Amino acid sequence: MMRILTFDNRFTSELPQDPICETYQRQVSNALWSTAQPTPVKNPQILAYSPEVASMLGFTAADMQDPALIQTLGGNGVLTGMVTYATRYGGHQFGHWAGQLGDGRAILLGELMHEGKRFELQLKGAGETPYSRSADGRAVLRSSLREFLCSEAMHYLGVPTTRALSLVSTGDLVRRDMFYDGNPQMEPGAIVCRVAPSFTRPGHFELMASNGELDLLKRFIGFTIDRDFSDWLPTTGLTLDKENPSPELIEAWFEEICERTAILMAHWMRVGFVHGVMNTDNLSIIGLTIDYGPYGWIDNFDPGWTPNTTDAQGRRYCYGRQPDISRWNMERLADALSTILPNTEGLADAITHYDNTYLKALTSSLAGKFGLDDWQDSDGELVNRVFELMTRAEVDMTLFFTKLAEINITTPTIDTIKDAFYTEQGFKQFGDDMQQWLNTYAKRLQQSKLSLEQRMTKMQSHNPRYVLRNYMAQEAIDLLTESGDNKRLLTLLELLKNPYTQQASMEQFEQKRPDWARQKAGCSMLSCSS
């Protein structure tokens, strides 16, 4: 029998509720959350779950097969102690203020306590909420599978992230226009159970500031510091008035948010991850990767690449712009906080801290990727040169760094990295330039204090061999959709638990993107339609 779960549910017990309990879409004021009940589905079936997340929450393997839990994870009822609700927030979307947004297809199940730790459980795709904005609140299998896998993949890459407990098929069909071309199709629906200490976003604070709800803004800041930054608070030497936190504490808290966010960006750049929709409502206040929509990993290195079809023209959220966009988002949060502070000097200092933290984290990760003993000013030119060549020659980012670790620094040869080139033309046109770069790089390594073994260890710990390329996820989606086969899904789930270690019989997942996947839907760019 499954253990009795303990729920704290501080969010709903300590913060004001929307007094209207009906689900119809509306503007909500002076409240942080609204009641929202998951909409029942026809036939919830567990397609996969993360044993590690289950254990983290106190669930056993037997619990994960318990019909009551499966029904709950599919949106058909709740367990004792759960409170179901959706939170209210706003956000800047593609650079423009969008007003109230909120949890439009995510319903929280409460705050589970286990071994002294707090976990918010959230069903994505469980039906309409007051913030659904005329949408159905559902999610399709393809997007749900991608979120489930990526949440776990990012964790094992060492990137701060929300986690995923389960992927459940609903037995219902969902109508989606995947290509925005006026030809919607019916697709199988699914629900992911997402897990995080907190799902709070900058947009929560932005909306209160925008609406002039300044007392509530102060109260929510105090709540957030007390609940979500309890380990950090003692390090400040400051005291917290939860109803009216001091300007000094708010400034220090904002600086901590900037620091965590900057470190997160350096991680994304290190592994080649592109979020795709870096709106202020899609970032975490505690520095996690959150809201996996049209994400992707860089295949052929291209700083201008975005996985989001909606962003194809402006490329606002492309790989190379992510650190700057993240900083821009921090500035928008600073705008919100400035409404309750006597001056903005401390906020400006925090933005400078973001810049310094990101630069430090980036250079550290680049030293690791290239196997350097430390970072020297001259290394910037060396790194920028190879990134330029990789872009022009169409070189696979993940495979390049895997092979670069194998370079003989006494007699470096381009043959070692030849497999990372996507085209023979690119190899022929830029091969000589790349060989010259390898010669320069080898000389730099010869000056290093690191032994061969130390360099290899450092590079292999910074450069994943396996990442969740879009075509890999799409193959798992196709198998599930066409024949109900979840073997590829489970294979990827296991593979991605050890992304830095070569695994037997997994050679196919170490290869660069196949040619057939270059333009295939779901294998390159994706839409936000799900």
Image (spheres, helix red, strand yellow):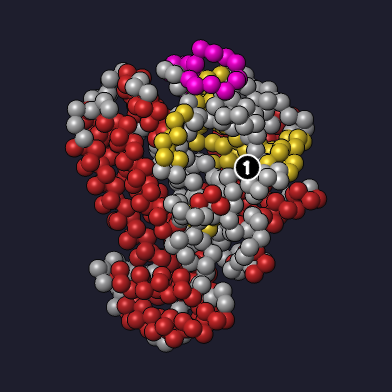
Quick one: which residue is furthest to the right in this view?
483
The C terminus appears in which quarter of the rendering? top right
Name the residue at 24% across, 38% down: 347
Magenta span includes 320: no
Q: Which residue is mark 1?
A: 530
Quick one: which residue is furthest to the top in this view?
19
Tell me where the magenta segment starts and ends, as one range.
11-28
Name the residue at 79% across, 51% down: 482
Magenta span includes 12: yes
Name the residue at 50% across, 36% down: 196
Query: Residue 270, percent across and down?
Result: 43, 59
Q: Secondary structure at mark 1?
A: loop
Left or right of 112, for residue 343: left
Name the residue at 36% across, 70% down: 383
For residue 519, what is the image quadrant?
Answer: bottom right
Query: Residue 309, percent across and down?
Result: 56, 52
The N terminus appears in which quarter of the rendering? top right
Is residue 309 depicted above or below 437 in this figure?
Answer: above
Secondary structure character of the magenta stretch overall: loop
Is residue 432 depicted above or below 26 in this figure?
Answer: below
Is residue 502 depicted above or below 409 in this figure?
Answer: above
Query: Residue 256, percent across and down?
Result: 31, 39
Query: Residue 50, percent across and down?
Result: 62, 43
Q: Amino acid at mark 1?
A: Ser
Q: Residues within 10 Å of mark 1 (few under 14, many from 20)?
A: many
Say if residue 373 shows up in the picture.
Answer: yes
Tell me how many marks there are. Answer: 1
Q: Nearer the viewer, residue 174 or 387?
A: 174
Say if residue 492 shows up in the picture.
Answer: no
